[in-house]
Image (tube, rainbow, N blue to C red):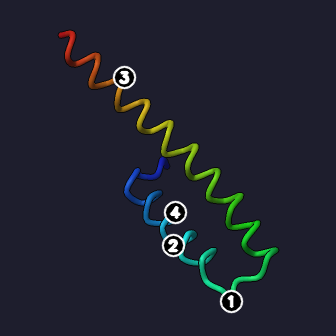
Amino acid sequence: MERKYEDLMTELREIVKKIEDTETSLDESIALYERGAVLVKQCEELLSSAELKITSLGRD
């Protein structure tokens, strides 16, 4: 099942908080960064899809 944009953004915010936490190890920060990069790509894809839908609706 495809996740909602809002859910992805919530997870991204949590990742940022953990990375900014001084208690997070370097290795964990790197893993979190990698996960964040995947989430950003998914968000971009969802936004691109939404933009195409909106553009298509505007032509009708």
Residue mark closest to the camera, 4 vs 3: 4
- The residue indicated by pointer 1 is 23
Specify the quadrant of the image occupied by residue 32.
Answer: bottom right
Q: Which residue is outermost to the top?
A: 59
Specify the quadrant of the image occupied by residue 50.
Answer: top left
- The residue indicated by pointer 4 is 12
Element marked by disc 3? helix
In this view, 23 is above or below 13: below
In this view, 23 is above or below 40: below
**Structural crowding at the residue carrying mark 1, measured as other residues with C-alpha within 10 Å and reported as few (<14), some (14–19) or many (≥20):** few
Mark 4 in CB contact with mark 3 (< 8 angstroms): no
- The residue indicated by pointer 2 is 14
Q: Which residue is outermost to the bottom?
A: 23
Give the CA distance from mark 1 to mark 3.
Answer: 42 Å
In this view, 56 is above or below 54: above
Mark 2 in CB contact with mark 4 (< 8 angstroms): yes
Q: In the image, residue 26 lies at what x, y percent? A: 79, 76
Residue mark closest to the camera, 3 vs 2: 2
Mark sitting earlier along the chain (1/2): 2
Give the CA distance from mark 3 to mark 2.
Answer: 29 Å
Q: In the image, residue 29 lies at what x, y percent? A: 72, 72
Residue mark closest to the camera, 1 vs 2: 1
Mark sitting earlier along the chain (1/3): 1
Q: Amino acid at mark 3?
A: Leu
Mark sitting earlier along the chain (1/4): 4
